[in-house]
Image: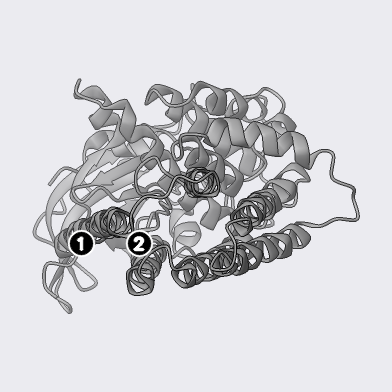
Amino acid sequence: MSWPDDFLETPAFDLVARALQADMIGKTVSNYRIEERLGSGGMGVVYRATDTRLQRPVALKFLPEAYHEARAAATLNHPNICTIHEIGAHEGRQFIAMELLEGKTLKQELGAGSWEPGRSVDIAIQVATALEAAHEKGIIHRDIKPANIFITQSGVVKVLDFGIARMPGSAEPQKFGTRGYMAPEQVRGGAGDARSDIFALGVVIREMGGDAAIVARCVAEDPSQRFQSAGELRSALRRDTTFVLAAFERRLLERMARRVPRGIRPNHFTALGMVGAAGAGVAYALTRDTLAWLWVASLMLGVHWLGDSLDGTLARVRGAERPKYGYYLDHVMGALSVVLVGVGIGVSGYVSATLMLGLVIAYLALAVNVYLEATVFGVVKVEYGRVGPTEARLALIAVNTALALGVRPGARMANWTLWCVLAGMTLVFVLRLARNLSRLATLEPQR
């Protein structure tokens, strides 16, 4: 078991816990039989225990009276937040029974000397996802640091220790935290908000060797210059590590979004993207009559890119981030767009219609897998490698141009190429499925 003492590390400003029970080993508290002490510090004492009713291992944490971690954390139910099973009291002291985690804290991982910077973004995305869930309920963590970020053996990140979290409606100033991770407004004793947690996460990302531009925005002195929500930070982290052209595309789209008239809304661009996809599909189908329709197909793919990419950018630039609505709408429209374009290519006669149907099904299977991973593991990874929608559209436009200019590969070669693509997509799906089942087998060994 590797819940270390340092995960309960005492924060700044003299948060010293009172002496709790010196020896609880072997005692039964409520329906929990205590077996060993796992850690202690300013936020309380943690023991390994067995739930005698359900016969499952738990972590039993006794809290100093001044802290309200149980009240804050118990309201949260998220894959990236340590789960609270029960809140109770024993001999006047509050305790919480929570899931028993196997793994290491990020502080331990960083101190091991074998840290891989490439892991930083995945971990930061999971922490940001957890903070987004907490902030939506008005709960500010106030002590994000490597010691409070736990990485399980299956790679799932869990945010720990809401011991000094600020509850909704509380007027209490943000005077607690751990020096070095505290936002300037916390240090000054002011009433911070979600952006204070973003500051702390920025410091953590910097320690992990993450992207300098994202870190600089997270730790800006002025809260208004930081990411304004954990969801916005999460989106930036995801874009930063995905597609080859992501950075260039992001700058271009942001420049375009700032010039969009106020009367045009993100949904207008979503509709434009669907028009582009439908137009491309129809143009591909009409290439049976004349190759000139390939130019129209390329133009409509450009329209599809504009609408599909600019809707979310416009919302972000205007400070109207729509994490749930936008996520749902974008991915539904994305799936429909692939079907429309794929059917059009299948009807065109350039490749086998059956093969094209297989590619569309493979894409949708990969997309569904992304949604399931987001639900089960709390992590959204829309990419499979470094090729994204923009690169795929450019590849199609390049093929369109070659065909329109008279470069005509044989049908056999075209079909074999697509067979290779389909085989690759299938292999990726199988590997991701096997990996996810392995992770779930570790998380739920008695299934």
Q: Counting other residues with Cα less than 10 Å from the Cα at mark 2, is it few (<14), some (14-19), or many (20 or more)?
A: some
Mark 2 falls on what kind of element? Answer: helix
Mark 1: which secondary structure?
helix
Residue lying furthest bottom = 53
Display coloring? one colour
Residue at figure coordinates x 24%, y 31% from the top left: 109
Characterize the local packing of mark 1: few (<14), some (14-19) or many (20 or more) Cα atoms within 10 angstroms.
few
Q: Quadrant of residue 79?
A: bottom left
Query: Can residue 10 be spotted in the picture?
Result: yes
Instruction: Indicate left or right for 324 with 45 as reference.
Output: right
| Pick the front one: 58 or 323 | 323
Q: Position of residue 412 (x, y in %)?
A: 27, 59
Q: Nearer the viewer, residue 279 or 74?
A: 279
User: Which residue in the protein does label 1 denote?
Assistant: 430
x and y, in percent, of residue 348 in the image: 49, 68
Q: Nearer the viewer, mark 1 or mark 2?
A: 1
How far across and down, in percent of the image, does residue 393 sit? 53, 49
**Compared to 278, does 307 lie above or below?**
above
Q: What residue sits 78% from the left and 61% below the top?
A: 268
Q: Which residue is more in the foreground, 279 or 2? A: 279
Mark 1 to mark 2: distance in Å? 14 Å
Q: Earlier in the sequence, mark 1 or mark 2?
A: 2
Would residue 43 appear left or right of 155 to someone viewing this image? right
Answer whether residue 20 is visible to the viewer in this image.
no
* Image disc number at residue 373: 2
Looking at numbered disc 1 in the image, what kind of residue is underneath it?
Answer: Val
Could you say which is closer to the camera, residue 62 or residue 118? 118
Residue 7 % position (x, y):
30, 38
**Type of residue at label 2?**
Glu
Q: Which residue: 58% across, 67% down?
A: 281
Judged left or right of residue 45, residue 267 is: right
Reply above or below: 83 against 402: below
